Image: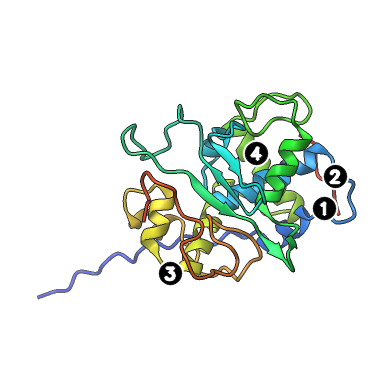
Amino acid sequence: MGIRAGTAPHRAQTPSWSLHRVLSYLTFEGVPLEVCHLLQKALFLLALATGYRASQLAALTRHTAFSSVTPNLTSLTISPSPAFLAKNEQADDRIGPLAVPSFLRDGNFHPLCPVHAFVAYVEASRGASPDHLFYNSRSGNPLFPRSIARLLCRVIENGDPGHAPRAHSVRGVATSLAFLRTHSVERVRDLGGWASTSSFRTRYLFHSLSPTPCVAMGTPPSIPQGPRGRHMGGRGRPKRKGRVI
């Protein structure tokens, strides 16, 4: 009896751009910070810290009911507007808010702390409507998914030019780092809002990422004991300045 050759499982291809170089760019060392820099920093670090799609990032607001920072800035609890339904999300089965921890070094905020980046950007653009989080720093118009994706790609190009990046690869990097830190594919499935683990395994899981100093999908660079960076109810319980935008 003949043996039918099986199809080799698909493996997601690790992005060619360097996360370390992009994060180094986002420290903006020696650069006088303007709102455009704070926007780039907050957007990219929150994209990593949440693992959200561009559509979810565009649905974030400044309303404290959906973007709440603890008084001592140790964490940010965040979720898109309730009027927004993410892919695979149902009205009666919502993805819960995500607790994003601060990133500290020697008791101080690390330059790549997403909570501090969020607070700094909101303070610098405090005249904006609370109905959106991210705004074009020139026009003052809210950033919608396509603009969010373009800006993520621009940040990557500014930090590591010449790789024709895809914005969705940031979600793959965030979810892969979270898995490599927790070794729980079920946890990443729930946080990412996938119906099954197969989508994450075949389309997003990058096996060759190195340890990176950033918060990724609610997980700090070094996982402490205890349930940090998890959903709070709902599904998943358990240098150069760069171009101005």
Q: Quadrant of the N terminus?
A: bottom left
Element at badge 2? Answer: loop
Q: CA distance from mark 4 to mark 1?
A: 20 Å
Q: CA distance from mark 3 to mark 1?
A: 32 Å
> 10 Å neighbourhood of mark 3: few (<14), some, or many (≥20)?
few
Q: Position of residue 117 (x, y in %)?
A: 71, 47
Q: Position of residue 196 (x, y in %)?
A: 32, 53
Left or right of 158 on screen, residue 187: left
According to the picture, the residue beneath numbered tag 1 turns out to be 28
Q: Nearer the viewer, residue 32 or 55?
A: 32
Q: Nearer the viewer, residue 91 or 185?
A: 91
* Mark closer to the chain start, 2 or 3: 2
* Mark closer to the chain start, 1 or 2: 1
Q: Is residue 145 above or below residue 189?
A: above
Q: Nearer the viewer, residue 65 or 168?
A: 65
| Residue 150: numbered disc | 4
Q: Position of residue 129 (x, y in %)?
A: 67, 24
Q: Do the CB atoms of the residues marked 4 and 1 lie less than 8 Å apart?
A: no
| Residue 183: numbered disc | 3
Left or right of 182 on screen, residue 32: right
* Mark closer to the chain start, 3 or 1: 1
> Can you tell which quarter of the image residue 173 is in?
bottom right
Q: Quadrant of the C terminus?
A: top right
According to the picture, the residue beneath numbered tag 2 turns out to be 33
Mark closer to the observer (3, 4):
3
Residue at position x 44%, y 50% from top?
Answer: 231
Element at badge 4? Answer: helix
Mark closer to the observer (4, 1):
1
Give the amino acid at mark 2: Leu
> 10 Å neighbourhood of mark 1: few (<14), some, or many (≥20)?
some
Give the amino acid at mark 3: His
